[in-house]
Image (cartoon, rainbow, N blue to C red):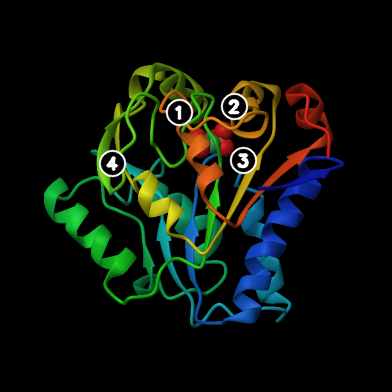
């Protein structure tokens, strides 16, 4: 596992965006695995800016997102589809037909089949997967306690609901379930880049970085089994973790 310690979160976003941009420059027809959440948010305007300056061409990429809240209409401004459209796809001029964010409104069984079709139907695995990490230690919405390999509907942890309540008017409005790529889906990506900031992520990252155990208590520890993972953290978080390069 490669760990990049940056001066600050802003630099982390730049480093993370550059990794995705480099992938698309190397292969303009890349399949990108994308993530939402607060931490990844500033990564997208950097990529949009590069596109507007003509430094990258997104016209041939395809994208698959990690997850979506169950019950959430794709037009709802709290949906991850809306987040992606507003922050990346529309400003970068990406054809929405080349993008996939699961719908929280469709029949789950049919949506899981469609999700798998988007991940594997063209025989082209995700080239680079962007990840955040939850306070619970989740990646995607793979919460502690179970290690499920494939796309599934996941009940969200109390800590996840509390953490995501900041995006909603009331905590009671946060959906309690999500559809997510499974851990095996994430591990099939060619490269993985995980960006994290904030002391509240230190306990989970300590379990990822400071020992050799893979445990369902912290699903992100499965990343130890992948050969090309980069974790991007700032100095403040590195100090909190007790990580030294
Ligand atoms: P956050 O979420 O970036 O909003 O903290 C990360 C995650 O839950 O994976």
Question: Between tags 1 and 3, which lies in front?
Answer: 1
The picture places residue 48, in percent across and down from the top left corner, at 64, 66
Question: How much space separates mark 4 and mark 3, taking CA atoms?
Answer: 21 Å
Q: Residues within 10 Å of mark 1 (few under 14, many from 20)?
A: some
Q: State the residue position of label 2.
A: 207
Q: In the rendered image, is residue 62 in sight?
A: yes
Tell whether 160 sits left or right of 20.
left
- Within 8 Å of ligand 1, the CB of disc 1? no
Which of the 4 image quadrants contains residue 212?
A: top right
Sooner in the amino-acid sequence: mark 1 or mark 4 = 4
Question: Between tags 1 and 4, which lies in front?
Answer: 1
Q: Residue at x 51, y 75 (%)?
A: 30
Question: How much space separates mark 2 and mark 3, taking CA atoms?
Answer: 20 Å
Q: State the residue position of label 1.
A: 215
Q: State the residue position of label 4.
A: 72
Q: State the residue position of label 3.
A: 39
Sooner in the amino-acid sequence: mark 2 or mark 4 = 4
Sooner in the amino-acid sequence: mark 1 or mark 3 = 3
Q: Which of the four quarters of the rendered structure image does ligand 1 lie in? A: top right
Question: Between tags 4 and 3, which lies in front?
Answer: 3
Q: Residue at x 40, y 28 (%)?
A: 216
14 in relation to 237, above or below: below
* Secondary structure of residue under mark 1: loop
Question: How much space separates mark 1 and mark 3, taking CA atoms?
Answer: 24 Å
* Secondary structure of residue under mark 2: helix
- Within 8 Å of ligand 1, the CB of disc 3? yes
């Amino acid at each position: 596992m490669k760990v990049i310690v940056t001066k600050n979160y802003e630099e982390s976003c730049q480093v993370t965006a550059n990794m995705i941009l480099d992938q698309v420059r190397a292969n303009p027809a890349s399949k990108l695995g994308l993530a939402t959440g607060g931490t990844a948010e500033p990564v997208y305007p950097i990529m949009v800016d590069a596109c507007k300056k003509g430094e990258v061409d997104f016209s041939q990429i395809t994208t698959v997102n990690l997850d979506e809240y169950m019950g959430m209409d794709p037009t709802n401004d709290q949906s991850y589809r809306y987040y992606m459209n507003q922050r990346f796809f529309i400003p970068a001029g990406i054809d929405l037909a080349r993008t996939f964010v699961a719908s929280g409104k469709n029949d789950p069984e049919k949506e899981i089949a469609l999700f798998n079709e988007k991940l594997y139907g063209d025989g082209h695995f995700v080239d680079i997967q962007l990840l955040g990490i939850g306070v619970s230690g989740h990646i995607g919405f793979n919460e502690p306690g179970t290690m499920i390999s494939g796309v599934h509907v996941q009940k969200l942890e109390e800590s996840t609901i509390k953490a995501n309540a900041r995006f909603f008017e009331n905590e009671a409005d946060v959906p309690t379930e999500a559809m997510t790529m499974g851990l095996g889906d994430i591990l099939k990506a060619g490269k993985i880049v995980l960006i994290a900031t904030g002391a509240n992520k230190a306990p989970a990252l300590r379990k990822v970085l400071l020992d050799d155990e893979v445990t369902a208590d912290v699903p992100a520890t499965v990343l130890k089994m992948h050969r090309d993972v980069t974790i991007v953290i700032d100095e403040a978080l590195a100090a909190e973790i007790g990580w030294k390069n």
